[in-house]
Amino acid sequence: MERKYIIPLRKAWLKVPIYYRSRKAVKATREFLRRHMKVEDVKIGKYLNKKLWARGNRNPPHKVEVLATKVEDEGKVYVKAELPDAPKEEKKEVKDKTLIQKVKSKITEPKQEEKVKEEVLKEEKPKKQEKPKKVTKAKENKETSQDIRATLNKSDKKR
């Protein structure tokens, strides 16, 4: 069952502090749809949610037009609310694998991985010769200061 509603939100969000307004608008939308569609579980679509929050937390829309659809799925009944002009998302059907297919896929996967590893090893090229590292001035200064300290320590021990 599909119905189109224009939900008044202003009376609801004017009763709460300014920083709770969009949150209250979402709750008022759910409550309106519960009352009118006579279903406890209400799911708000992402485009409707974005519209309610588009102008931030403090300034939600005064009213919003909603297309409410009652869905019965696996014994559960809920309402899906979305904007009327929102693109419809279709569910992709996932084919259930039988137990035999799952076992076959587990057995064949390691063989494929071994083949890939062998190919990678064959394609692996010998490593290039390493270039000598460049010594920066800071490193040179550290080395010289360490040498100076070592010589000073040796001279102190002799005394």
Image (cartoon, grey):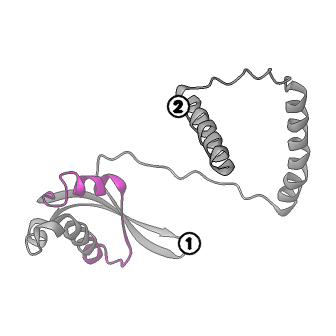
Disc 2 is placed on an element classified as: helix
Residue at 91%, 35% (x, y): give it.
118
Estimate the x, y position of residue 124 in percent, counting from the top left: 85, 27
Residue at 84%, 63% (x, y): give it.
99
Q: CA distance from mark 2 to mark 1?
A: 70 Å
Q: Amino acid at mark 2?
A: Ala
Q: Which residues make up the magenta segment?
A: 33-61
Residue at 53%, 31% (x, y): give it.
138
Estimate the x, y position of residue 157 in percent, counting from the top left: 67, 51
- Per the rendering, the mark at residue 6 is none
Residue at 85%, 52% (x, y): give it.
105
Q: Is residue 113 above or below residue 77?
A: above
Q: Is residue 45 magenta?
A: yes
In the picture, measured across the screen, residue 38 lies left or right of residue 106, that is: left
Instruction: Characterize the local packing of mark 2: few (<14), some (14-19) or many (20 or more) Cα atoms within 10 angstroms.
Output: few
In the picture, measured across the screen, residue 94 lies left or right of residue 83, that is: right
- Per the rendering, the mark at residue 138 is 2
**Viewer-side residue, 143 vs 85:** 143
Q: Amino acid at mark 1?
A: Glu
In the picture, measured across the screen, residue 95 lies left or right of residue 2, that is: right
Q: Mark 2 or mark 1, which has the lower sequence index?
A: 1
The mark closer to the camera, 2 or 1, is: 2
> What residue is pinned by disc 1?
74
- Which quarter of the image is occupied by the N terminus? bottom left
Q: How many marks?
A: 2
Q: Quadrant of residue 80?
A: bottom left
